[in-house]
Amino acid sequence: MKKSLPFIIIALVLVAGIVVFVVFSRKTGSEGTNAFVGSGAPTSSAASPVAVTQASPTATIPITKPNVKVSSPVVLEEYGDYQCPPCGILYPELKKLEHEYGNQLRIVFRHFPLTKIHKNAMSAARAAEAARNQNKFDQMHDRLYRNQSAWKDLDDARSIFLGYARELGLNIDRFTRDMDSPEVEQRIATDMQRGSGVGVTGTPTVFIEGQMLRPDATTPDGLRQGINYMLQRKAAS
């Protein structure tokens, strides 16, 4: 018995090591290979994103756009802040995605100005919505992000925004009134309330077909993987 005891101890240690390895492998495997974290099913409603889960595309999902046909585009929603530096970095990537996916992708921007840390964010959001009243939201949106460094640190950026409005050929009197209007204020407030209700706490926060993309997956490749995953789901449904 004494002679066999060391072998029994060694065997027990080996078995324990194998058990720990298997448990750890299953845990990390489930975190790394599941397309989405959580149990909520993806939805395709731009009007009602679900916030109970956070989507994370896996490394196994191809980055190349799948050759599939869908009856409706994949909806990508961004909750953004025009003064937010990471939002400014994300902006050109989203423009590339729009060009790359064409009518297979619809990108929706929702306001979530972080007014406690970005003093001009709310004013910029108001400028974008005032431009929307004259059918120039996209053009103002582009100028705000492309020129973010020119106005983000100003004590009062309104004069810059008025300059953008003139460049776009907007009616300046109307633009000025609309920037301060309750209607514009309400639109921004609605987006912010909606974002808070679906779990948005910072910017940029991206939803793809109603599923929140994890911050660490909000990269050019991560966005493509998430879009491709949803395109495949739509094509198979």
Image (cartoon, helix red, strand yellow):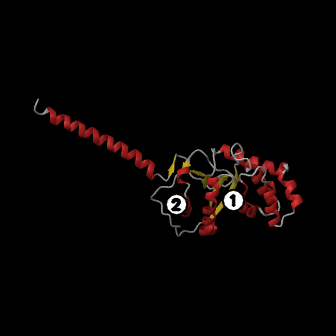
Relative to residue 108, is residue 102 depicted above or below? below
Q: Mark 1 highlights which residue?
A: 145
- The residue at the point 78 percent across, 58 percent down is 160
- Expressed as whole percent of the image width and height from the top left, the position of residue 23 reads 36, 42
The correct choice, above or below, for 4 with respect to 48 in the image is above
- Measured as percent of width and height from the top left, residue 94 is found at 62, 62
Would residue 71 be seen by someone viewing this image from the given angle?
no
Quadrant position of the N terminus in the picture: top left
Measure how far apart labels 2 and 1 are at the Cα level: 21 Å
Amino acid of disc 2: Asp
Secondary structure under the numbered disc 2 in the rendered image: helix
Q: According to the image, label 2 marks what residue?
A: 221
Q: Position of residue 209 (x, y in %)?
A: 60, 55
Label 1 residue SS: helix
Return the residue found at the far right: 173
Q: Amino acid at mark 1?
A: Tyr
In the rendered picture of this protein, how many numbered marks are placed on residues? 2
How packed is label 2: few (under 14 Cα within 10 Å), some, or many (20 or more)? Answer: some
For residue 182, say whether it is visible. yes
Q: Quadrant of residue 237?
A: bottom right
Badge 1, how many Cα within 10 Å: few under 14, some, many 20+? many
Query: Image check: 41 left or right of 34?
Result: right
